[in-house]
Amino acid sequence: MAKSNRGPTSRLNLKLVERILAEVKEEEIVAMCCDVINIPSPTGDEGKMAEHMRAAWEGIGLDVTWQEVEEGRANVIARWEGTGTGRCLMFNGHMDTSNTGQEEFLTGIGYKPNAVIKDGMIYGLGIYNMKGALVCYTHAVTALQRAGVRLQGDVILAAVAGEIEKTQWKEFRGREYRGYGVGTHYLVNHGVLPDVCILGEPTDMQIILEHYGSLWVRISVTGMYVHTAFAAGRAERNSIRRLYDVLGVVLKWMKGWEQKNTYRGHKGVANLGCIRGGQPWRVSRTPERAELFLDLRVPPHMPMQAARRAAKSLFLDLKKRYPDYGLEFETYVSVPGATIAPDHVMVRAIEMNHQRIMSELPKRDVVLWCSDASVMTRYGIDTVNYGPSSGPRDAEGEKVKIKTLVDITKIYALTAAELCGVQ
């Protein structure tokens, strides 16, 4: 096997490696994956999934802490204590799923909280984002225990609530809208502080060295509220028509944002995510307000304040163009990007063990989605995204090859041994 020119020499002897790998059991991984898929856990309703993880981790003898984030949802923190003062490694994964499983327009079997095994794959809501990773963490620790490994540093397993990219806004209130890292924010705010962290987000076993941040922006216009019968001659004061004028300027600005914020080969992204105005049950009235909502993906090197200033400059330009439109501006999500050094000891350990199992080095990438690395890195916790998924997203929904789940469990186990040190 070719040696990596990226990674270090392994501190684990070959017999120990073979003992650890022999304790990774495919049938156990598959069974637990099916169990967790079959527990619906949309954002805000992670309680049953949390109870399942607590029982699983207590069942393998870990010291488990229950962090109630709010009623009906919790973080579950499990610690396998080391024998000394070695490096403390966290495996962190969110329990909430990208969708609820009730969306009528998502018909694929992988969009439902019902596990299906077909053609060497497991299908079901949450399997790659990211319940499968939680299963792999569990069985990585189990393999180390069964192999008789005693680590010098601690391993922490964290199943967290509320990571999915969503937020409260005005009438959209309640726990089902509290995502964007609420669980991991609670975790680090309440004393759980590892040295390093692996997030098993669905990266297709690529190492994500950096990811973009996100800024959500609202721009509103106001207009005259009037019955259709009395709207004649007042068309220019209709807020939807005014928003149409504003939208043309915004779309042009978005192209400039995308060009200016190209980063490491990735073109910048600005998404027009929502437009609101009027009521479908009362179109006999002109709407008093119309608004648009943008998701600006912010390169990891750009401060969020700089991104906000850029969006505010757009708004100020609009106010000059349309002084009578009653324009308003708001930013209501600000999640910075995250980065880790390509030669970081954790990156090198993952690469070395990936090559050991897969006979090749993993690819590296920068991605446009956000993760809880945004939270962890703000607390000085070096964090990398590296997890299981299987190919591009398609109409079938979430799915992961069983072999991928087994392979990455082996890589997680060996990486924990490398990073934490073996007694």
Image: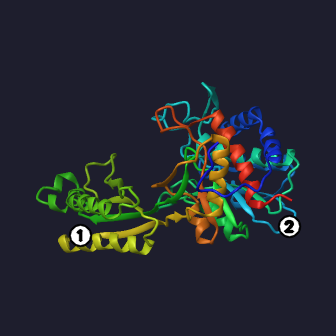
On screen, residue 324 versus residue 50, left or right, reads: left
**Residue 22 position by quadrant:** top right
Mark 2 Cα within 10 Å, few/some/many (few <14, many 20+)?
Answer: few
SS of the residue at dot 2? loop
Whether residue 289 is visible: no
Q: How is the image coloured?
A: rainbow
**Residue 304 position by quadrant:** bottom left
Q: Which residue is mark 2?
A: 84
Q: Quadrant of the C terminus?
A: bottom right
Q: Is residue 99 above or below residue 293?
A: above
Q: Position of residue 369 (x, y in %)?
A: 48, 54
On screen, residue 26 versus residue 210, left or right, reads: right
In the depicted view, which residue is nearer to us: 289 or 368?
368
What amino acid type is highlighted by mark number 2? Gly
Q: Position of residue 388 (x, y in %)?
A: 60, 43
For marks 1 and 2, give the CA distance. 60 Å
Whether residue 378 is visible: yes
**Residue 66 position by quadrant:** bottom right
What amino acid type is highlighted by mark number 1? Leu
Q: Quadrant of the N terminus?
A: top right
Farthest top residue in view? 119
Q: Position of residue 269 (x, y in %)?
A: 36, 56
Q: How many marks?
A: 2
Q: Which mark is residue 318?
A: 1
SS of the residue at dot 1? helix
| Label whose residue precedes the other's in the sequence (1 or 2) | 2
Farthest front residue in view? 2
